[in-house]
Image (cartoon, grey):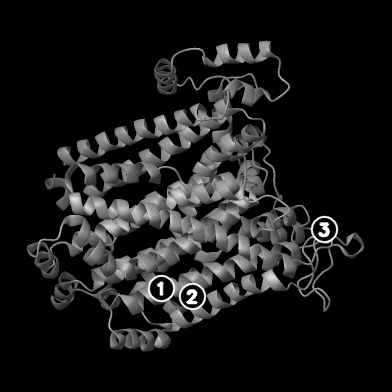
């Protein structure tokens, strides 16, 4: 377990790490914006104002209005909820299924391990977009199907990370000591293996979170993600496409929101890796 | 080498078979009858029965699977229900757009990323390194379809240098065809190049920290010789792995990018098929793309053995 001193030490190290700080700042801003949107947005996202449509950024509408006269800033704020929710749940599905699979494969080895690796090969053959296409073809489009498609793609990623980390932990002396004291494989996995790989899982979770935001945007852009009237960044870009020659601002801002969020998460992930895994930093 | 190669090929075949079962079962888990789903609510019972027979839905499950699999292997993907033509001829027509698009993007992204990555690694910590990795960090975060929109705005709407979308067909001339693929390939290639440049740089830095690099320097080789003769070759494995994975992402990416530029490729085909509930087409295209991903990754695995002689002797 991590002691208070060790924790304080990594906190100091984290605050000295530039990518971590910038990443945390950006991610925090996006999270705050999403939280704020539950209580307040500059305009209600459901109100159409046809007279004031396609207006470029102004004092009244900081980021302009879309083809229905809706306030783009308000839509981006509400849309962030969608992106965050889809990406978060997909990471949880990936970690929730993948980590136990990886731990199990590492603990048992042999045929179970081989089967897991083949399962990974299989899932990796279906890029998230392709599984989304398949799922949508059968069950119709929607945020839930997007979550399932991205979640499935996350499973082998977490399984691989958990398996790799567990395999490197099993030969350690303290595991041997735990075995000598009579603990079974399941108990050792839960009590000793899993707590020692949380850092790795947090870093991987951050990376998958940012990939999830990108994937969700892509899926809703082609109409396979969340459906109207729920605003989503991807669909805002789809709607902007037909207006690109008269209202380019409609395409610029939702895209910047995606880049900003993904960049923040990537920086946070890079920073966390450096802070939490000093060994890796030396190699780099 | 033979053991390594045959094991990899065997795994590839098993994965392909498993993937075919997944894709095939998708039709089976359709709530209700696939024929009715494809024809819609207002279909007459007669029409449904005819389609059921045409799709062979009245036959036992296993027999249908093996017939479908046999068909795939002999190039018979079934008949499209909306176009009333064999799926394989639809695919052949569309792949003439998607494959060039994916290959040009891959070539473009490799041509940009490897030199940038090598340059950054060889001048680690310099302003040029920091700047190019900063650009790469942003590039990784850019969704390719948004980048595509911006390219359309700048080069098609404002500057009017290239068409905003559409594809004249290869019969209209190779140059016209290529011209309409320029923006889509750039849009696909640059975000991928950002990832590849970062991987190349960090793979090279890992290798440059090895003892044999110090030895090579100590025996009097120039930095340049060490970089090109020793480091680059050894940094190739992670780069190859990412290239293989990226091909899968590029293929999937073409699906989205084709929708931005209204290119009549596999991606457009699959989305039209979804709206028209032409599940046979969806099944065929997805199976083809998945098979491509598996085969490309198999080739990448096999090429490891060429790059890294140690793998040849290891089983």
- In the image, what residue occupies the spot 42% across and 61% down? B196
Residue at point 42% right, 71% down?
A269
- Marks 1 and 2 in Cβ contact (< 8 Å): no
* Residue B163 image position (x, y, % from top left): 71, 49
Residue A67 circle label: 3
Relative to B64, is A257 on the left or the right? right
Residue of label 1: A270
Q: Residue at x 11, y 62 (%)?
A: A179
Q: Secondary structure at mark 2?
A: helix
Residue sitting farthest toward the left: A180
Identify the chain of the residue marked 3, using the numbered disc in the image. A
User: Which secondary structure lies at badge 3?
Assistant: loop
Q: Which mark is residue B134?
A: 2
The numbered mark 2 sits on a residue in which chain?
B
Q: Marks 3 and 2: which is nearer the front?
A: 3
Give the quarter of the image for residue B147. Answer: bottom right
Are the residues tagged 3 and 1 within 8 Å (C-beta)? no
Badge 3 or badge 1: first in the primary sequence: 3
Calculate the distance from the C-alpha at mark 3 to the C-alpha at mark 2: 35 Å
Name the image quarter holding residue A133. top right
Residue A233, x across and y down, in percent = 65, 60
Q: Position of residue A2 (x, y in %)?
A: 28, 79
Confirm or deny contact between disc 3 and disc 2 (CB under 8 A).
no
Q: Who's the residue at 44% across and 46% down the image?
A: B248
As measured in the structure, the alpha-carbon distance from the residue carrying label 1 to the one carrying label 2 is: 13 Å
């Amino acid at each position: 377990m991590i002691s208070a001193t060790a924790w304080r030490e990594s906190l100091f190290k984290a605050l000295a790490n530039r990518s971590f700080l910038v990443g945390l700042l950006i991610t925090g801003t996006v999270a705050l914006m999403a939280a704020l949107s539950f209580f307040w947005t500059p305009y209600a996202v459901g109100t159409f104002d046809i007279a004031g449509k396609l207006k470029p950024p102004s004092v009244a509408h900081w980021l302009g209005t879309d083809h229905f006269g809706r306030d783009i800033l308000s839509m981006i704020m509400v849309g962030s909820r969608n992106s965050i929710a889809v990406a978060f749940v997909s990471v949880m599905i990936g970690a929730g299924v993948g980590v136990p699979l990886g731990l199990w494969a590492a603990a048992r080895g042999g045929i179970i391990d081989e089967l897991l690796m083949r399962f990974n090969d299989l899932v990796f053959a279906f890029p998230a977009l392709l599984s989304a296409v398949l799922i949508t073809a059968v069950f119709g489009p929607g945020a839930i199907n997007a979550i399932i498609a991205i979640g499935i793609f996350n499973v082998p990623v977490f399984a691989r990370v958990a398996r790799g980390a567990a395999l490197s932990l099993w030969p350690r002396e303290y595991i041997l000591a735990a075995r000598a004291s009579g603990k079974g494989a399941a108990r050792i996995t839960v009590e000793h293996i899993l707590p020692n790989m949380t850092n790795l899982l947090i870093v991987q979770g951050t990376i998958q979170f940012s990939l999830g935001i990108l994937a969700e945007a892509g899926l809703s852009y082609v109409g396979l993600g969340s459906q109207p009237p729920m605003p989503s960044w991807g669909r805002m870009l789809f709607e902007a496409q037909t207006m690109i020659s008269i209202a380019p601002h409609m395409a610029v801002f939702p895209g910047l929101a995606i880049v900003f969020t993904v960049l923040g998460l990537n920086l946070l992930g890079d920073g966390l890796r450096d802070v939490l895994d000093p060994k890796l930093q030396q190699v780099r | 080498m033979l053991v390594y190669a045959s094991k990899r090929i065997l795994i590839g075949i098993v994965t392909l078979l498993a993937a075919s079962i997944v894709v095939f079962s998708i039709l089976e888990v359709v709530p209700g009858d696939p024929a009715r789903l494809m024809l819609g609510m207002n279909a007459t019972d007669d029409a449904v029965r005819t389609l059921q027979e045409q799709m062979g839905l009245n036959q036992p499950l296993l027999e249908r699977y093996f017939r479908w699999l046999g068909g795939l292997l002999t190039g018979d993907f079934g008949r499209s229900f909306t176009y009333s033509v064999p799926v394989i001829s639809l695919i052949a027509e569309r792949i003439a757009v998607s494959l060039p698009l994916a290959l040009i993007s891959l070539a473009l992204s490799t041509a940009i990323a490897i030199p940038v990555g090598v340059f950054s690694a060889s001048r680690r910590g310099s302003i040029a390194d920091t700047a190019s990795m900063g650009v790469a960090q942003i590039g990784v975060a850019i969704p390719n379809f948004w980048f595509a929109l911006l390219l359309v705005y700048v080069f098609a709407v404002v500057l009017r240098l290239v068409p905003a979308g559409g594809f004249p067909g290869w019969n209209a001339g190779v140059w016209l065809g290529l011209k309409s693929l320029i923006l889509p390939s750039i849009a696909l290639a640059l975000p991928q190049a950002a990832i590849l440049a970062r991987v190349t740089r960090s793979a090279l830095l890992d290798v440059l920290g090895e003892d044999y690099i110090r030895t090579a320097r100590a025996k009097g080789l120039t930095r340049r010789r060490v970089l090109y003769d020793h480091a680059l070759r050894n940094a190739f494995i992670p780069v190859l792995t990412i290239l293989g994975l990226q091909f899968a992402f590029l293929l999937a990416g073409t699906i989205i990018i084709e929708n931005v530029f209204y290119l009549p490729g596999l991606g457009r085909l699959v989305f039209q098929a979804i709206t028209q509930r032409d599940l046979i087409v969806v099944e065929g295209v997805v199976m083809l793309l998945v098979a491509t991903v598996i085969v490309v990754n198999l080739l990448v695995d096999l090429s490891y053995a060429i790059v890294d002689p140690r793998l040849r002797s290891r089983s």
